[in-house]
Amino acid sequence: SKCDIDLGSSKMLTYDEALQQVLQTVQRMPVEKVELERILGRILAESIRAEFDLPRFNNSAVDGFGVLISDVAQASTDKPIKLNLVGTIHAGDRADGPALKSGETVKILTGATVPPSVEAVIMREYCVEESGIVAFATNAETGENVRRKGDEVKQGEEVLPAGIEASPPVVGLIASFGHAKFPVYQQPRVAVVVTGDELVKPGGALEDGQIFESNSFALAAAVKALGLPDCRTIHARDDREATEQAFLLALDDQQADVIISAGGVSVGEHDYVKVVLEQDIGVTSVFWKIAIKPGKPVFFGFIDRPDREGGKPRRRIIFGLPGNPVSALVTFNLFVKPALMAMQGALDGPKSGWFGSLERDMKKKPGRLDFVRGILSCSPEGALNVLPTRGQDSHMLSGLAKADCLIQFPADDERLSQGQCVRLERLDWHS
Protein backbone atom coordinates (compact mmCIF):
# COMPACT_ATOMS: atom_id res chain seq x y z
CA SER A 1 0.00 0.00 0.00
CA LYS A 2 1.16 3.53 -0.69
CA CYS A 3 2.48 5.48 2.29
CA ASP A 4 0.29 8.52 2.93
CA ILE A 5 2.42 10.06 5.66
CA ASP A 6 3.49 13.69 5.22
CA LEU A 7 7.25 13.67 4.77
CA GLY A 8 7.68 17.37 4.20
CA SER A 9 7.70 18.60 7.76
CA SER A 10 11.10 19.24 9.36
CA LYS A 11 9.66 19.29 12.86
CA MET A 12 10.86 16.44 15.04
CA LEU A 13 8.22 13.85 15.83
CA THR A 14 7.20 12.98 19.35
CA TYR A 15 7.74 9.44 20.59
CA ASP A 16 4.04 8.58 20.24
CA GLU A 17 3.87 10.06 16.72
CA ALA A 18 6.95 8.15 15.58
CA LEU A 19 5.72 4.86 17.02
CA GLN A 20 2.33 5.33 15.36
CA GLN A 21 3.99 5.94 11.99
CA VAL A 22 6.08 2.80 12.39
CA LEU A 23 3.00 0.70 13.11
CA GLN A 24 1.10 2.28 10.19
CA THR A 25 3.92 1.46 7.77
CA VAL A 26 4.76 -2.16 8.56
CA GLN A 27 2.82 -4.98 6.92
CA ARG A 28 2.00 -8.40 8.30
CA MET A 29 4.02 -11.37 7.19
CA PRO A 30 2.43 -14.24 5.23
CA VAL A 31 0.79 -17.13 7.06
CA GLU A 32 2.18 -20.66 7.31
CA LYS A 33 1.18 -23.81 9.16
CA VAL A 34 3.72 -24.99 11.72
CA GLU A 35 4.00 -28.26 13.63
CA LEU A 36 3.25 -28.03 17.33
CA GLU A 37 6.82 -29.07 18.15
CA ARG A 38 8.04 -25.83 16.53
CA ILE A 39 5.20 -23.45 17.33
CA LEU A 40 6.36 -22.20 20.74
CA GLY A 41 6.75 -18.42 20.72
CA ARG A 42 5.04 -17.94 17.35
CA ILE A 43 2.07 -15.62 16.84
CA LEU A 44 -1.24 -17.31 16.00
CA ALA A 45 -2.71 -16.24 12.66
CA GLU A 46 -6.14 -17.71 13.46
CA SER A 47 -8.24 -17.83 16.57
CA ILE A 48 -8.48 -21.12 18.44
CA ARG A 49 -12.05 -22.37 18.22
CA ALA A 50 -13.47 -25.30 20.11
CA GLU A 51 -13.78 -28.26 17.77
CA PHE A 52 -15.93 -29.92 20.45
CA ASP A 53 -17.05 -29.38 24.02
CA LEU A 54 -14.39 -29.28 26.70
CA PRO A 55 -14.56 -31.53 28.58
CA ARG A 56 -15.89 -33.81 25.85
CA PHE A 57 -17.81 -35.90 28.38
CA ASN A 58 -18.58 -35.97 32.08
CA ASN A 59 -15.45 -37.27 33.81
CA SER A 60 -14.02 -37.63 37.27
CA ALA A 61 -11.63 -35.06 38.72
CA VAL A 62 -10.27 -37.59 41.24
CA ASP A 63 -9.73 -41.24 41.93
CA GLY A 64 -12.83 -42.17 43.90
CA PHE A 65 -16.23 -43.80 44.02
CA GLY A 66 -19.41 -42.73 42.27
CA VAL A 67 -22.49 -42.55 44.50
CA LEU A 68 -26.10 -41.47 44.78
CA ILE A 69 -26.44 -38.48 47.09
CA SER A 70 -29.21 -40.06 49.14
CA ASP A 71 -27.07 -43.15 49.89
CA VAL A 72 -24.32 -41.17 51.66
CA ALA A 73 -26.36 -38.33 53.15
CA GLN A 74 -25.81 -39.58 56.71
CA ALA A 75 -22.21 -40.77 56.28
CA SER A 76 -19.59 -39.56 58.79
CA THR A 77 -16.33 -40.72 60.32
CA ASP A 78 -18.26 -41.98 63.36
CA LYS A 79 -20.95 -43.75 61.34
CA PRO A 80 -19.64 -44.72 57.89
CA ILE A 81 -22.09 -45.89 55.25
CA LYS A 82 -21.35 -49.14 53.40
CA LEU A 83 -22.25 -49.69 49.73
CA ASN A 84 -21.77 -52.59 47.36
CA LEU A 85 -19.03 -52.14 44.74
CA VAL A 86 -20.49 -53.03 41.32
CA GLY A 87 -17.60 -52.18 38.95
CA THR A 88 -14.61 -50.07 37.96
CA ILE A 89 -14.32 -47.44 35.23
CA HIS A 90 -10.82 -46.64 33.98
CA ALA A 91 -9.74 -43.58 32.00
CA GLY A 92 -10.23 -44.41 28.34
CA ASP A 93 -13.03 -46.94 28.88
CA ARG A 94 -15.68 -46.37 26.23
CA ALA A 95 -18.59 -47.82 28.16
CA ASP A 96 -20.77 -45.51 30.26
CA GLY A 97 -20.44 -47.92 33.17
CA PRO A 98 -23.18 -49.48 35.25
CA ALA A 99 -26.42 -47.68 36.09
CA LEU A 100 -26.25 -47.25 39.85
CA LYS A 101 -29.08 -48.41 42.06
CA SER A 102 -29.58 -47.46 45.68
CA GLY A 103 -27.02 -49.19 47.89
CA GLU A 104 -24.41 -49.43 45.10
CA THR A 105 -21.17 -47.64 44.21
CA VAL A 106 -18.74 -47.77 41.29
CA LYS A 107 -15.00 -47.09 41.37
CA ILE A 108 -14.08 -44.27 38.96
CA LEU A 109 -10.47 -43.28 38.24
CA THR A 110 -9.31 -39.76 37.37
CA GLY A 111 -10.37 -38.74 33.86
CA ALA A 112 -12.72 -41.69 33.44
CA THR A 113 -16.28 -41.28 32.21
CA VAL A 114 -18.88 -40.60 34.89
CA PRO A 115 -22.09 -42.53 34.09
CA PRO A 116 -25.33 -40.48 33.95
CA SER A 117 -26.65 -42.24 37.05
CA VAL A 118 -23.71 -41.13 39.23
CA GLU A 119 -24.53 -37.93 41.12
CA ALA A 120 -21.15 -37.33 42.78
CA VAL A 121 -17.68 -38.85 43.15
CA ILE A 122 -16.22 -39.15 46.64
CA MET A 123 -12.43 -39.14 46.91
CA ARG A 124 -10.91 -42.50 47.79
CA GLU A 125 -9.20 -40.86 50.80
CA TYR A 126 -12.61 -40.83 52.51
CA CYS A 127 -13.38 -44.43 51.59
CA VAL A 128 -12.31 -47.90 52.68
CA GLU A 129 -12.64 -50.73 50.14
CA GLU A 130 -12.72 -54.32 51.35
CA SER A 131 -14.11 -57.53 49.80
CA GLY A 132 -16.50 -55.78 47.42
CA ILE A 133 -17.80 -53.37 50.04
CA VAL A 134 -16.89 -49.67 50.28
CA ALA A 135 -17.31 -47.72 53.52
CA PHE A 136 -17.85 -43.95 53.16
CA ALA A 137 -16.83 -41.56 55.98
CA THR A 138 -18.28 -38.43 54.38
CA ASN A 139 -21.35 -37.26 52.48
CA ALA A 140 -21.33 -35.40 49.15
CA GLU A 141 -23.00 -32.65 47.18
CA THR A 142 -24.49 -33.07 43.72
CA GLY A 143 -21.77 -32.78 41.05
CA GLU A 144 -18.91 -33.03 43.52
CA ASN A 145 -15.62 -33.98 41.77
CA VAL A 146 -17.41 -34.31 38.41
CA ARG A 147 -16.10 -32.34 35.44
CA ARG A 148 -19.22 -31.63 33.39
CA LYS A 149 -19.26 -31.79 29.61
CA GLY A 150 -18.74 -28.32 28.13
CA ASP A 151 -17.99 -26.68 31.49
CA GLU A 152 -14.81 -25.09 30.12
CA VAL A 153 -15.93 -24.25 26.59
CA LYS A 154 -18.75 -25.14 24.22
CA GLN A 155 -18.24 -26.44 20.69
CA GLY A 156 -17.80 -23.57 18.20
CA GLU A 157 -16.81 -20.94 20.77
CA GLU A 158 -13.66 -18.86 20.33
CA VAL A 159 -11.25 -19.99 22.98
CA LEU A 160 -8.37 -17.60 22.25
CA PRO A 161 -8.07 -14.86 19.60
CA ALA A 162 -5.56 -14.63 16.78
CA GLY A 163 -2.55 -12.49 17.51
CA ILE A 164 -1.48 -14.11 20.77
CA GLU A 165 1.85 -15.82 21.34
CA ALA A 166 1.98 -19.59 21.53
CA SER A 167 3.00 -20.09 25.15
CA PRO A 168 3.27 -23.61 26.63
CA PRO A 169 -0.39 -23.65 27.78
CA VAL A 170 -1.51 -22.29 24.40
CA VAL A 171 0.41 -25.08 22.66
CA GLY A 172 -1.28 -27.58 24.97
CA LEU A 173 -4.70 -26.10 24.19
CA ILE A 174 -4.12 -26.37 20.44
CA ALA A 175 -3.08 -29.98 20.88
CA SER A 176 -6.14 -30.71 23.02
CA PHE A 177 -8.31 -29.95 20.00
CA GLY A 178 -6.37 -32.39 17.85
CA HIS A 179 -4.31 -30.00 15.72
CA ALA A 180 -0.92 -31.36 14.64
CA LYS A 181 -0.21 -28.02 12.90
CA PHE A 182 -1.62 -24.53 13.35
CA PRO A 183 -1.50 -21.32 11.25
CA VAL A 184 1.01 -18.72 12.42
CA TYR A 185 2.57 -15.65 10.85
CA GLN A 186 5.98 -16.11 9.30
CA GLN A 187 8.85 -14.65 11.25
CA PRO A 188 10.60 -11.69 9.62
CA ARG A 189 14.20 -12.17 8.59
CA VAL A 190 16.44 -9.53 10.12
CA ALA A 191 19.86 -8.23 9.15
CA VAL A 192 22.05 -5.87 11.16
CA VAL A 193 24.36 -3.40 9.42
CA VAL A 194 27.06 -1.74 11.53
CA THR A 195 29.20 1.13 10.26
CA GLY A 196 32.47 2.50 11.61
CA ASP A 197 36.17 2.40 10.75
CA GLU A 198 37.12 2.53 14.42
CA LEU A 199 35.40 -0.75 15.26
CA VAL A 200 37.26 -3.99 15.95
CA LYS A 201 35.61 -7.38 16.39
CA PRO A 202 35.94 -8.72 19.95
CA GLY A 203 38.88 -11.09 20.25
CA GLY A 204 41.17 -8.92 18.17
CA ALA A 205 43.78 -6.40 19.29
CA LEU A 206 43.01 -2.72 19.69
CA GLU A 207 45.18 0.06 18.35
CA ASP A 208 45.01 3.69 19.41
CA GLY A 209 41.66 5.21 18.51
CA GLN A 210 39.89 1.87 18.10
CA ILE A 211 37.12 0.27 20.18
CA PHE A 212 35.58 -3.16 20.28
CA GLU A 213 32.37 -3.38 18.26
CA SER A 214 29.37 -4.27 20.42
CA ASN A 215 26.26 -3.09 18.56
CA SER A 216 26.00 -6.03 16.17
CA PHE A 217 26.19 -8.51 19.06
CA ALA A 218 23.72 -6.57 21.22
CA LEU A 219 21.18 -6.00 18.43
CA ALA A 220 21.45 -9.59 17.19
CA ALA A 221 20.85 -10.73 20.76
CA ALA A 222 17.82 -8.42 20.99
CA VAL A 223 16.42 -10.00 17.83
CA LYS A 224 17.06 -13.51 19.13
CA ALA A 225 15.44 -12.66 22.49
CA LEU A 226 12.19 -12.11 20.58
CA GLY A 227 12.32 -15.70 19.37
CA LEU A 228 13.33 -14.75 15.82
CA PRO A 229 15.90 -16.69 13.81
CA ASP A 230 19.54 -15.71 14.07
CA CYS A 231 20.22 -12.65 11.96
CA ARG A 232 23.17 -11.90 9.71
CA THR A 233 25.41 -9.00 10.75
CA ILE A 234 27.27 -6.97 8.16
CA HIS A 235 30.09 -4.51 8.89
CA ALA A 236 30.56 -1.57 6.54
CA ARG A 237 33.44 0.88 6.31
CA ASP A 238 32.74 4.57 6.65
CA ASP A 239 32.38 5.33 2.95
CA ARG A 240 29.38 5.69 0.71
CA GLU A 241 30.02 2.77 -1.62
CA ALA A 242 30.69 0.31 1.20
CA THR A 243 27.59 1.46 3.03
CA GLU A 244 25.48 0.97 -0.11
CA GLN A 245 26.91 -2.51 -0.71
CA ALA A 246 26.15 -3.52 2.88
CA PHE A 247 22.49 -2.57 2.56
CA LEU A 248 22.16 -4.21 -0.86
CA LEU A 249 23.68 -7.38 0.56
CA ALA A 250 21.07 -7.35 3.34
CA LEU A 251 18.24 -6.67 0.89
CA ASP A 252 19.15 -8.98 -1.99
CA ASP A 253 21.46 -11.74 -0.79
CA GLN A 254 20.07 -12.04 2.72
CA GLN A 255 16.49 -11.26 1.65
CA ALA A 256 15.98 -9.44 4.94
CA ASP A 257 12.48 -8.24 5.77
CA VAL A 258 13.88 -5.83 8.35
CA ILE A 259 17.27 -4.15 8.27
CA ILE A 260 18.63 -2.52 11.40
CA SER A 261 21.69 -0.34 11.06
CA ALA A 262 23.71 1.16 13.89
CA GLY A 263 25.76 4.28 13.34
CA GLY A 264 26.25 6.60 10.40
CA VAL A 265 22.76 8.04 10.61
CA SER A 266 23.46 11.54 11.95
CA VAL A 267 24.95 14.55 10.13
CA GLY A 268 28.66 13.86 10.49
CA GLU A 269 31.14 13.96 7.61
CA HIS A 270 31.12 10.15 7.32
CA ASP A 271 27.45 9.52 8.12
CA TYR A 272 26.26 7.97 4.87
CA VAL A 273 23.31 5.83 5.95
CA LYS A 274 20.50 8.28 5.26
CA VAL A 275 21.84 9.53 1.94
CA VAL A 276 22.62 6.01 0.71
CA LEU A 277 19.18 4.70 1.62
CA GLU A 278 17.27 7.62 0.09
CA GLN A 279 19.40 8.50 -2.94
CA ASP A 280 21.25 5.33 -3.91
CA ILE A 281 18.81 2.56 -2.98
CA GLY A 282 15.47 4.36 -3.27
CA VAL A 283 14.12 3.85 0.24
CA THR A 284 11.05 5.90 1.08
CA SER A 285 11.82 7.93 4.17
CA VAL A 286 9.03 8.02 6.76
CA PHE A 287 10.87 10.00 9.42
CA TRP A 288 14.32 11.04 10.60
CA LYS A 289 14.92 12.49 14.06
CA ILE A 290 12.62 12.14 17.03
CA ALA A 291 12.33 14.44 20.04
CA ILE A 292 13.64 11.83 22.47
CA LYS A 293 16.83 11.13 24.38
CA PRO A 294 18.66 8.87 23.85
CA GLY A 295 17.96 8.25 20.19
CA LYS A 296 17.24 11.55 18.47
CA PRO A 297 18.78 10.60 15.06
CA VAL A 298 16.60 7.61 14.19
CA PHE A 299 15.86 6.95 10.52
CA PHE A 300 12.85 4.91 9.52
CA GLY A 301 11.81 4.00 6.00
CA PHE A 302 10.71 1.23 3.67
CA ILE A 303 11.19 -0.10 0.19
CA ASP A 304 8.84 -2.40 -1.74
CA ARG A 305 11.25 -4.74 -3.45
CA PRO A 306 10.77 -8.12 -5.18
CA ASP A 307 12.63 -11.13 -3.90
CA ARG A 308 15.46 -12.77 -5.84
CA GLU A 309 13.05 -15.01 -7.72
CA GLY A 310 11.32 -11.92 -9.07
CA GLY A 311 8.10 -12.53 -7.19
CA LYS A 312 5.56 -10.01 -6.02
CA PRO A 313 7.24 -7.00 -4.36
CA ARG A 314 7.13 -7.11 -0.60
CA ARG A 315 7.77 -4.41 1.91
CA ARG A 316 11.20 -4.27 3.53
CA ILE A 317 11.58 -2.12 6.63
CA ILE A 318 14.75 -0.18 7.43
CA PHE A 319 15.70 1.31 10.79
CA GLY A 320 18.77 3.52 11.01
CA LEU A 321 19.61 3.59 14.72
CA PRO A 322 22.26 5.75 16.40
CA GLY A 323 25.70 4.27 16.91
CA ASN A 324 25.94 4.87 20.64
CA PRO A 325 25.25 1.47 22.24
CA VAL A 326 22.58 2.65 24.70
CA SER A 327 20.82 4.70 22.02
CA ALA A 328 20.78 1.72 19.67
CA LEU A 329 19.28 -0.65 22.24
CA VAL A 330 16.77 1.80 23.71
CA THR A 331 15.44 2.75 20.28
CA PHE A 332 15.33 -0.94 19.36
CA ASN A 333 13.04 -1.51 22.35
CA LEU A 334 10.92 1.55 21.61
CA PHE A 335 10.47 1.14 17.85
CA VAL A 336 12.03 -1.97 16.29
CA LYS A 337 10.53 -4.46 18.72
CA PRO A 338 6.93 -3.16 18.25
CA ALA A 339 7.47 -3.28 14.48
CA LEU A 340 8.72 -6.87 14.56
CA MET A 341 5.78 -7.93 16.74
CA ALA A 342 3.26 -6.11 14.51
CA MET A 343 4.70 -7.80 11.41
CA GLN A 344 3.95 -11.13 13.07
CA GLY A 345 0.35 -10.12 13.76
CA ALA A 346 0.73 -9.71 17.51
CA LEU A 347 -2.20 -8.10 19.24
CA ASP A 348 -1.61 -4.52 20.30
CA GLY A 349 -0.88 -4.53 24.00
CA PRO A 350 -2.28 -1.88 26.31
CA LYS A 351 -0.32 1.34 26.46
CA SER A 352 2.10 1.26 29.34
CA GLY A 353 0.22 2.06 32.52
CA TRP A 354 3.08 1.57 34.94
CA PHE A 355 3.75 4.33 37.43
CA GLY A 356 6.24 4.52 40.27
CA SER A 357 7.57 6.83 42.90
CA LEU A 358 10.91 8.42 42.01
CA GLU A 359 13.66 7.74 44.55
CA ARG A 360 16.01 10.53 43.48
CA ASP A 361 15.79 14.05 42.07
CA MET A 362 16.47 14.40 38.35
CA LYS A 363 17.03 17.35 36.06
CA LYS A 364 17.57 17.95 32.35
CA LYS A 365 17.21 20.54 29.61
CA PRO A 366 13.66 20.87 28.25
CA GLY A 367 12.80 19.97 24.66
CA ARG A 368 13.01 16.17 24.43
CA LEU A 369 11.33 13.26 26.15
CA ASP A 370 14.08 11.52 28.10
CA PHE A 371 14.00 7.75 28.64
CA VAL A 372 15.98 7.41 31.85
CA ARG A 373 17.17 3.95 32.73
CA GLY A 374 15.75 2.82 36.06
CA ILE A 375 15.56 -0.04 38.55
CA LEU A 376 12.20 -1.05 40.04
CA SER A 377 11.61 -2.00 43.64
CA CYS A 378 8.59 -2.50 45.86
CA SER A 379 8.09 -1.04 49.33
CA PRO A 380 6.79 -3.20 52.22
CA GLU A 381 3.45 -1.43 51.73
CA GLY A 382 3.31 -2.56 48.09
CA ALA A 383 4.18 0.78 46.45
CA LEU A 384 6.26 0.67 43.26
CA ASN A 385 9.48 2.69 43.45
CA VAL A 386 12.04 3.45 40.75
CA LEU A 387 15.68 4.51 41.08
CA PRO A 388 17.61 5.96 38.12
CA THR A 389 20.72 3.93 37.39
CA ARG A 390 24.18 5.41 37.43
CA GLY A 391 25.64 5.88 33.97
CA GLN A 392 22.93 7.62 31.93
CA ASP A 393 25.08 8.79 29.01
CA SER A 394 24.29 7.15 25.67
CA HIS A 395 27.61 5.28 25.54
CA MET A 396 27.30 3.79 29.03
CA LEU A 397 25.95 0.27 28.61
CA SER A 398 26.43 -0.59 32.28
CA GLY A 399 23.47 1.57 33.30
CA LEU A 400 21.23 -0.07 30.72
CA ALA A 401 22.43 -3.54 31.69
CA LYS A 402 21.27 -2.94 35.27
CA ALA A 403 17.93 -1.38 34.30
CA ASP A 404 14.56 -3.10 34.12
CA CYS A 405 12.52 -0.05 33.10
CA LEU A 406 12.67 3.32 31.37
CA ILE A 407 11.52 6.40 33.28
CA GLN A 408 9.68 8.91 31.09
CA PHE A 409 11.05 12.39 31.82
CA PRO A 410 8.53 14.62 29.98
CA ALA A 411 9.86 16.85 27.21
CA ASP A 412 8.81 20.17 28.75
CA ASP A 413 9.96 19.39 32.28
CA GLU A 414 13.32 20.42 33.67
CA ARG A 415 13.11 18.77 37.08
CA LEU A 416 11.53 15.73 38.67
CA SER A 417 11.57 15.54 42.45
CA GLN A 418 12.13 12.62 44.77
CA GLY A 419 8.78 11.06 45.64
CA GLN A 420 7.14 12.31 42.44
CA CYS A 421 4.96 9.85 40.52
CA VAL A 422 6.52 9.08 37.13
CA ARG A 423 5.42 7.07 34.12
CA LEU A 424 7.41 3.94 33.31
CA GLU A 425 8.05 1.75 30.29
CA ARG A 426 8.82 -1.83 31.28
CA LEU A 427 12.18 -2.78 29.77
CA ASP A 428 11.50 -6.30 28.58
CA TRP A 429 13.69 -7.72 25.85
CA HIS A 430 11.41 -10.70 25.25
CA SER A 431 8.27 -10.85 23.13
Image: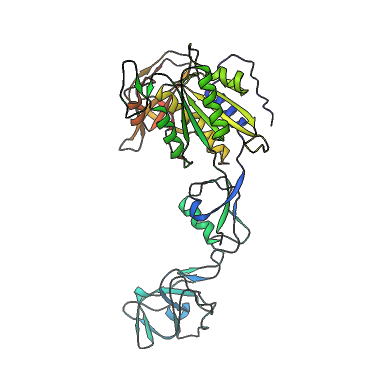
| Residue 5 in view of the camera | yes
In the image: residue 21, left or right of residue 136 = right
Q: Position of residue 231 (x, y in %)?
A: 47, 36
In the image: residue 363, left or right of residue 41 = left
Farthest residue to the bottom: give it: 131
> Would you place residue 104 above or below residue 257 in this image?
below
Q: As rendered, which of 399 and 196 lies closer to the eye?
A: 196
Q: Position of residue 97 (x, y in %)?
A: 51, 81
At 40% from the left and 15% from the top, the residue drawn is: 364
Q: As rendered, which of 343 and 391 lies closer to the eye?
A: 343
Q: As rendered, which of 97 and 286 lies closer to the eye?
A: 286
Q: Quadrant of the N terminus?
A: top right
> Would you place residue 118 above or below residue 318 in this image?
below
- Which of the 4 image quadrants contains residue 79? bottom left
Q: Position of residue 55 (x, y in %)?
A: 53, 65
At 34% from the left and 15% from the top, the residue drawn is: 209
